[in-house]
Image (cartoon, rainbow, N blue to C red):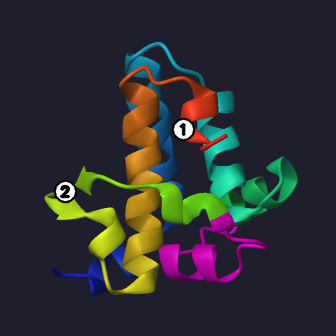
């Protein structure tokens, strides 16, 4: 698995793609933001600061206030890999986020996605 390139990719360049993917299925930016904030512990203001500062994925996750302890409940495949089996912790966090956005775009309820 090639990992290093995505680590240096600006989060701000992928964020609009998350919103676009969700919007194609009738989901909102607010729902995407809720997922990101739930996973990382950012609030809306600090999330926007990360986007505005053009932080890469490595910095984005390193500066996350509180990675959600329920993230370990996220299971399944993304990009051909089981998220619960990914050994590199940063890559696992990125794939957790990808998996949650996929679930949103597949129409799953927000309560399910946020593992409530």
Instruction: Read off the magenta span.
Output: 53-69
Left or right for 76, reference 27 = left
Element at label 1: helix
- Can residue 9 be spotted in the picture? no
Task: Tell which circle, 2 or 1, labels the residue nearer the N-terminal end.
Answer: 2
Q: Is residue 50 visible?
A: yes
Q: CA distance from mark 2 to mark 1?
A: 18 Å
Q: Residue at x 69, y 30 (%)?
A: 30
Residue under the image location 38 percent in, 19 percent down: 24
Identify the residue shown where x is 76% and y is 72%.
66
Badge 2 vs badge 1, beta-carbon distance below 8 Å: no
> Residue 69 falls in which quadrant of the image?
bottom right
Residue 79, labelled with which disc?
Answer: 2
Q: Position of residue 33 (x, y in %)?
A: 66, 41
Drawn side of residue 52 relative to residue 80, left or right: right
Q: Mark 1 sits on what residue?
A: 113
Magenta stretch containing residue 57, yes or no? yes
Q: Label 2: state its secondary structure.
A: loop
Residue 22 drawn above or below residue 5: above
Quarter containing the C terminus: top right
Horizontal and vertical percent position of residue 105: 40, 27
């Amino acid at each position: 698995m090639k990992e290093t390139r995505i680590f240096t990719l600006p989060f701000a360049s992928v964020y609009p793609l998350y919103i676009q993917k969700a919007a194609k299925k009738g989901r909102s930016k607010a729902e995407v933001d809720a997922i990101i904030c739930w996973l990382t512990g950012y609030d809306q203001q600090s999330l926007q600061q990360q986007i505005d500062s053009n932080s890469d994925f490595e910095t984005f996750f390193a500066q996350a206030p509180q990675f959600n302890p329920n993230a370990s409940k996220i299971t399944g495949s993304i990009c051909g890999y089981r998220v619960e089996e990914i050994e590199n912790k940063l890559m696992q966090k990125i794939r957790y986020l990808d998996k949650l956005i996929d679930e949103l775009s597949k129409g799953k309820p927000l309560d399910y996605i946020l593992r409530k």
